[in-house]
Image (cartoon, rainbow, N blue to C red):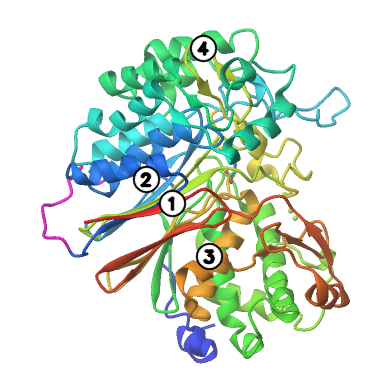
Amino acid sequence: MSLDKVKLSASAFAVAALVTVSSGLLETAPAYAKTSDQPAVLNASAIAVADKFSADAAEQIFKEGGNAVDAAVAIAFTLAVTYPEAGNIGGGGFMTLYVDGKPYFLDYREKAPISATRNMYLDDKGNVIKGMSLFGYRAVGVPGTVEGMWEAQRRFGKLKWKQVLAPAIKYATDGFEVSEQLQQRRDDAAKDFAGKTNFDTYFGNLKQGVNFKQPDLAAVLTRIANQGAKDFYDGKTADLIAASMRGHGLITKQDLHEYKAVWRQPVEANWNGYHVITAPPPSSGGIGLVQLLKMKADLAPDFKDVPLNSAQYVHLIAEIEKRVFADRAQYLGDPDFYKVPVAQLIDDSYLAKRAAEVNPTTPSDTKSVQPGLGTSMPEKAETTHFSVIDKWGNAVSNTYTINGYFGSGVVVDGTGIVLNDEMDDFSAKPGMANQFGVVGSDANAIEPKKRPLSSMTPTILTKDGKVSLVIGTPGGSRIFTSIFQVINNVYDFNMPLQDAVAAMRFHHQLLPPNTIFWEPYKPIEGELAQQIEAKGYKLQGQDFSGDIQVIKVNGDTPEPAADPRGRGVTRMVQ
Ligand code: GLY
């Protein structure tokens, strides 16, 4: 489809232009620059974060003169202490940034250990050994968070490194009050770890109302504050991680020494008058989000007058999602190991062709929906996200994870560091579904030093060079379908931001066939459930549906919103 045709057919939901996208390593990183001392362009800095302690940390950093990157790094380290079910220094993640009018993307995703092998989770009959990639030492990928935060702050931060670590060290030393939700998540996770890990030694006392102190973690954070990322990858903390793994897991000092975060080109696309800046591979999320936005725009005539979250709306979105997940299963993996056809997957004419295959009335037969360029995958839904904007107009959208709540359940002895179970995001047996029910191909098979495929989708929308929206969420394979729904609610249905975040969400991902997942927060029931079932879908409840943290900029005023599904909070700082 030519650009003109796209403009003609897309009408009110206009896809404005062809996308300029590439993915992969930036060969030559731009010269390191500090944010300029330009006058403020917004009347406040703002954050939307997963808990109140990290909000306080960010407020402190802004008051000390820090920018969005300083605040983001302080939030990340604080959540590692006060939101230990997903905040972390034992995991990894992605940071999308918009600094001094330019987009950046930092990949600090975990990597497979050097001694990892393709079949490491299979028994001698070739069957996946249940739970092995989820719980315990062999589930752990080489962590990237400390290196990622170090790299981001070194490149763009204004404050001293020690300053941004200070709030986290205070919470680890002095303690913080445990919430009901945190205890609940601990209790649920502990059942899976029982007898397999040392989890309870460190987190047995994580009870609602208790002032929870973490002296070992405080010592680690203090070393990192004094020595930088070097402590974690080459120093005493590296020694302790390697010692903890010996005889149990695969990570060695060499794995830690060789870990590097990578600056990549973000996925960028023009949509509906906005410039979308989002996550490239090894995330599937950015591509998935752009595919969803554009296919929905292509189908504007079909969506005309269809009420939000009606049975017909759910059907049309599920039809689009079917096609997105077919592509995800086949083409997505670590771009350092596998050439991901990013540009083709978000090309306007390709997506118009895929959108034209959507059946407007009944679900397309699942088997008939094949990857468009030329086979599908489950994942852990937990993770956590925060959104930050400073008064100079710089923004950070950061999603990071240890995969499941409390990751692998392994705590590094003498450190209090909870280690991830990110190895489960690889395809243990290509063609078989993972814990999120999504299927992977060879592109996401286990290889030494490879990064597992992710769905994390930290996203920034700009208009005329200025930040309009900073958004992201946890949710595994539900991440980009959740972000997509909130963006639709805001821009296509003009909903107030908080209502857009609170609105019902649903999810379909090709497999299981014709299944619509609903969430406990706003269940699909009654007449709506009957209408969706009458169309040929099965309805299935899921225990989680994201925790969106978003900031929308209205003129020169940022408006943050935290998802009522979690314990997130927002803050504006003058
Ligand atoms: N572990 C969840 C994700 O990376 O999407």
Magenta stretch contains residue 126: no
The picture quadrant where one finds residue 442 is: top right
Q: What type is the residue that disc 3 sits on?
A: Val
Q: Secondary structure at mark 1?
A: strand
Q: Which residue is mark 1?
A: 569
Q: What amino acid type should be assigned to the residue bearing mark 4?
A: Ala
- Residue placed under numbered mark 3 in the picture: 501
Mark-to-mark CA distance, 1 and 3: 13 Å
Q: Are marks 1 and 2 in contact (CB under 8 Å)?
A: yes
Mark closer to the observer (1, 3): 1
Q: CA distance from mark 1 to mark 4?
A: 36 Å
Category of crowding for the residue at label 4, using alpha-carbon neighbours closer than 10 angstroms: few (below 14), some (14–19), many (at least 20): many
Q: CA distance from mark 4 to mark 2?
A: 33 Å
- The residues bearing labels 1 and 2 have C-alpha atoms spaced at a distance of 7 Å
Q: Is residue 430 left or right of residue 479?
A: right
Q: Are marks 3 and 4 in contact (CB under 8 Å)?
A: no
Q: Which mark is residue 55?
A: 2
Locate the C terminus and report the quarter of the image it occupies: bottom left
Residue 27 makes an appearance in the image: no
Callout 3: 10 Å neighbours few (<14), some, many (20+)? many
Location of residue 217 in the rendering, given as x and y in whole percent from the top left corner? 43, 20
Q: Which residues are magenta?
A: 30-40
Residue in the foreground of this view, choosing between 559 and 382: 559
Identify the residue position indicated by label 4 in the image. 242
- Residue 2: % across, % down: 49, 84
Total tally of numbered discs in the picture: 4
Mark found first going from the N terminus, 1 or 4: 4
Q: Are marks 4 and 2 in contact (CB under 8 Å)?
A: no
N-terminal of the pair, mark 1 or mark 3, is 3
